[in-house]
Amino acid sequence: MADFVGAIDQGTTSTRFMIFDRAGTEISRGQIEHRQILPAAGRVEHDAREIGENARKTIDVALANAGLVASDLAAIGIANQRETVVLWDRATGEPVAPAIVWQDTRTAADLRELDADLLRERTGLPPATYFSATKARWLLDHTPGLRARAERGEVLFGTIDSWLIWNLTGGELHVTDVTNASRTQLMNLSTLAWDPVLLALFDIPEAMLPTIRSSAEVYGTALGTVPLAAAIGDQQAALFGQTCFEPGDAKCTYGTGNFVLLNTGTTPVRSTHGLLTTVAYKFKSQLPVYALEGSVAASGSAIQWLRDQLGILESASDSETLAASVDDSAGVCFVPAFSGLFAPYWRPDARAAIVGLSRFHTSAHITRAALEAICYQTRDVVVAMAQDSGTELDCLQVDGGVTANELCMQLQADILGVPVSRPAVAETTALGAAYAAGLAVGFWRSEDELRANRREDRRWTPTWAPDRRTEGISRWHKAVDRTLDWV
Ligand code: ADP
């Protein structure tokens, strides 16, 4: 049997292909960035053709780097940026419009007419420009002739997973997985099928939709003979790559923003505290596993802002040395609500603030406050998760760019009051897609085998006394209040 598994990690800014061995160790990778097309304020587009080509190229690069050929791969899995919409021509395989990216807010005006209770009940998601449905409707309404063609099944809809599977199988398969489908706002979270009420609400012809499959099963073959055996949204893939297989397991990915996902088991937990309910993964014909998700809009981007806009840091990693030069933030709070607050607040009217300044304070205090903000925001989401799910976290698995900052991770443990664990393989998204594909073809036999692969690189345990934590949290919430109702 082939000794390796490959994973495409198709992200918002780049496409990667990574090859892992049986121990879950990275053997090789290829990576290519793609263009961010910004035609107007609030609009973000990608060229789906470019993304498809990049996926093929990165596979070639990673195989060549490792001196491997396609037949050395036991399976390929896909992890992908979620919600982004691609429409293409069934006959030619060519995109018929630019892909509308998850960040795009052109459909904001459409949200007013939507019934929030109905959407939450059927999809686990609130009305937001974030999800795919309003984007697909926009393309159908603004491209001449497209709706009629879509109704005849000549134009197909897909999220990026569908588009890549279509391309890698030479146009044979029009499928998606449940995790990606759960972000379209067109799938019913309980039946895991396209919901006629939602299709009517968003005016989406059923003929254009892919078949919904599980996240880990052999869909078809790619590169001639390699089983294409997993598709899973990127945040869900990171949860899988962190081996968060038990209800109560949670991970936080720290990048531009924070994404916290909590495994809640086989029953969806409806949030009443500002979180999303989503499918975590579904393995073949087994019951689906659900998750609660909390997204924080700005975390690592606060560090970028200190570097690029204020110029008080040379590089993001300097934030650690500068913040460590003071014992604490000396009462300063930095709430990086640059574009409003996401989970659990959902306040688009909030704007960022640095409060509590006196003449004594320096760039070191502000930088330390920025690191603390990353951690307080995660804590707010984790608390909402405990309220919704009734389970307390006993350890947070972490990954993403910011976790290189050891001080920040110590602060995270201090502020959460539970340990924080960083795995040896930082690329948990690609690893999760590889694990799902490898399980589907029997390359790995069980979740236990994957858990045994997990190597902890570092663990931080809380050092703050409870009083200090309580005081910090209450100051943070006072600062959050100051940012609300600003625009
Ligand atoms: P994304 O996938 O969202 O682009 P990454 O996982 O690549 O994010 O992380 C990049 C983010 O992490 C940037 O916002 C950057 O400011 C932040 N970052 C990177 N290194 C550090 C560090 N050592 N300390 C604090 N923040 C960091």
Image (tube, rainbow, N blue to C red):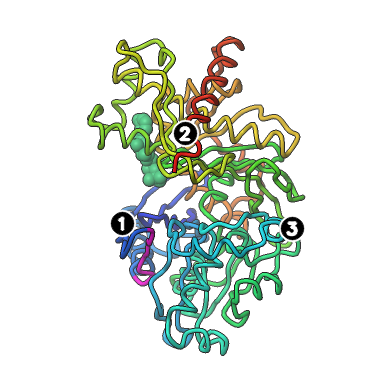
> Which residue is tagged 2?
483
Please tell me how crowded label 2 is: few (under 14), some (14-19), or many (20+) other residues with Cα within 10 Å.
many
Q: Contact (CB < 8 A) between labels 3 and 2?
A: no
Would residue 370 be seen by someone viewing this image from the given angle? yes
- Horizontal placement of 356 versus 465: left or right? left
2 or 1: tag closer to the N-terminus: 1
Q: Which residues are magenta?
A: 42-49
In what element is the residue under mark 3?
A: loop
- Horizontal placement of 450 versus 93: left or right? right
> Which residue is tagged 3?
286
> Which residue is tagged 1?
33
Q: Amino acid at mark 3?
A: Gln
Q: Residue at x 43, y 60 (%)?
A: 104
How far across and down, in percent of the image, does residue 356 sit? 41, 18
Where is the N terminus found, in terms of image quarters?
bottom right
- Horizontal placement of 70 versus 469: left or right? left
3 or 2: tag closer to the N-terminus: 3
Please tell me how crowded label 1 is: few (under 14), some (14-19), or many (20+) other residues with Cα within 10 Å.
some
3 or 1: tag closer to the N-terminus: 1
How far across and down, in percent of the image, does residue 159 sit? 51, 66
Please tell me how crowded label 3 is: few (under 14), some (14-19), or many (20+) other residues with Cα within 10 Å.
few
The reply to whether the magenta stretch includes residue 303 is: no
Label 2 vs label 1, nearer the camera = 2
Q: Is residue 341 above or below residue 55?
A: above
Residue 388 picture quarter: top right
Label 3 vs label 1, nearer the camera = 1
